[in-house]
Amino acid sequence: MTPLPIRILGIDPGLRRTGWGVIETCGNRLTFIGCGSVEPPDGLPLARRLLAIHQGLTKVLDEFEPAEAAVEQTFVNKDGVATLKLGQARGVAMLAPAMFGIAVSEYAPNQVKKTVVGAGHADKHQILVMLKLLLPKADPKSPDAADALAVAITHAHHRASTALRLKVVGA
């Protein structure tokens, strides 16, 4: 019996650009569905920026109807204020799919790089090269969209172990 395809939304949260990528996984096969980024206008206050991210992701969720979602965890840097603001964008990125009843998984940036490239400290160019190999039809217009596709691929590779972990915890 052939497994049914599962549609996955990957999200790379950011206040200036929140990348999104949608793939389908069926067994070991990955298929590119779509990608892009939500870009709130510059100069908006934080609350309006977060609202724009939520509205943009809601449109993506309505259009592509993913069954599962994955979000990249926040990279903590030396600027605490910037990290907190990014965390708010990440919260919105997790809230949007949750409002659709979609389970949301989280992956550390190094785990995403290691899954897609094979090295936890890969650069953006290496990720793009591997995306072309794994998803030949993908043409991300921004690094954020490429990162979001990488998050979706990571979830596709780890979803079975994530589901098992959740089942064990819930038992």
Image (cartoon, helix red, strand yellow):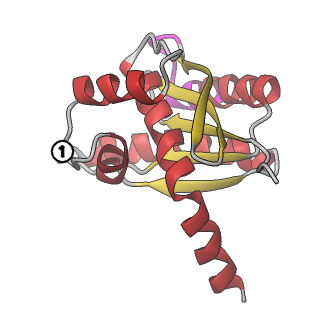
Say above or below: 169 vs 17: below
| Quadrant occupied by the N terminus | bottom right
Say above or below: 99 vs 21: below
Residue shown at 79%/46% (left/top)?
4
Residue shown at 41%/15% (left/top)?
142
The answer to whether one can see residue 48 in this image is yes
Residue to which mark 1 is pinned: 121
Question: Callout 1: 10 Å neighbours few (<14), some, many (20+)?
Answer: some
Q: Is residue 44 magenta?
A: yes
Left or right: 116 as drawn, with respect to 154: left
Left or right: 1 as drawn, with respect to 17: right
Residue shown at 54%/40% (left/top)?
152
Q: Position of residue 7 (x, y in %)?
A: 71, 39
| Quadrant occupied by the C terminus | bottom right
Closest to the observer: 110 or 23?
A: 23
Q: Is residue 138 magenta?
A: no
Q: Position of residue 75 (x, y in %)?
A: 31, 48
Res 141 quadrant in image:
top left
Closest to the observer: 53 or 151?
A: 151
Start and end of the magenta stretch? 41-51
Most extreme residue toward the bottom, as rendered? 171
Residue shown at 63%/37% (left/top)?
9
Question: Mark 1 is on which residue type?
Answer: His
